[in-house]
Amino acid sequence: MFQLIQRGQIYADALGWPIIIHYVTSQIVRYWRQGRINTASIDRFQQDFEYLDFHEARRIRAELETSEHIKHLRAMRA
């Protein structure tokens, strides 16, 4: 299915992390992931990334933040 990729849209990468589209050309996609800008070819992007609506992205971010917080608490305990 064809989908227009635009700046500001939210996708999930292959690892499940939410990413935000920063810049798109006919050959590359630049996106924000964990505070860094990364680059992917259009072909790779279409294969490895999945579109998320706002509510899905919010839920995933909350789960990831909870997971990171638990890791931090465990590290403090050790």
Image (spheres, rainbow, N blue to C red):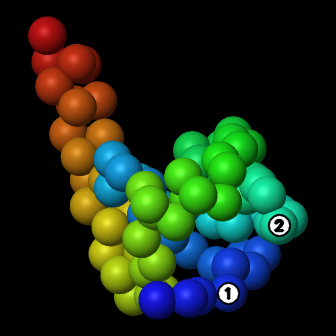
Q: Secondary structure at mark 2?
A: loop
**Rendering coords of residue 68 (x, y %):** 31, 41
Q: Quadrant of residue 62?
A: bottom left
Q: Nearer the viewer, mark 1 or mark 2?
A: 2
Q: Earlier in the sequence, mark 1 or mark 2?
A: 1
Name the residue tied to disc 2: 26
Q: Secondary structure at mark 1?
A: loop
Mark 1 Cα-neighbour bin, 10 Å: few <14, some 14–19, many ≥20:
few
Whether residue 58 is situated above or below residue 40 in the rendered picture: below
Frontmost residue, 35 versus 44: 44
**Label 1 vs label 2: CA separation?**
11 Å
Tag 1–tag 2 contact (CB < 8 Å): no
On residue 4, which mark appears? 1
**Rendering coords of residue 3 (x, y %):** 59, 88
**Quadrant position of the C terminus in the picture:** top left
Q: Amino acid at mark 1?
A: Leu
Q: Amino acid at mark 2?
A: Ser
Q: Is residue 13 visible?
A: yes
Q: Is residue 63 left or right of residue 20?
A: left
> Going 59% across and 48% down the picture, which residue do you hit?
33
Q: Is residue 26 left or right of residue 73?
A: right
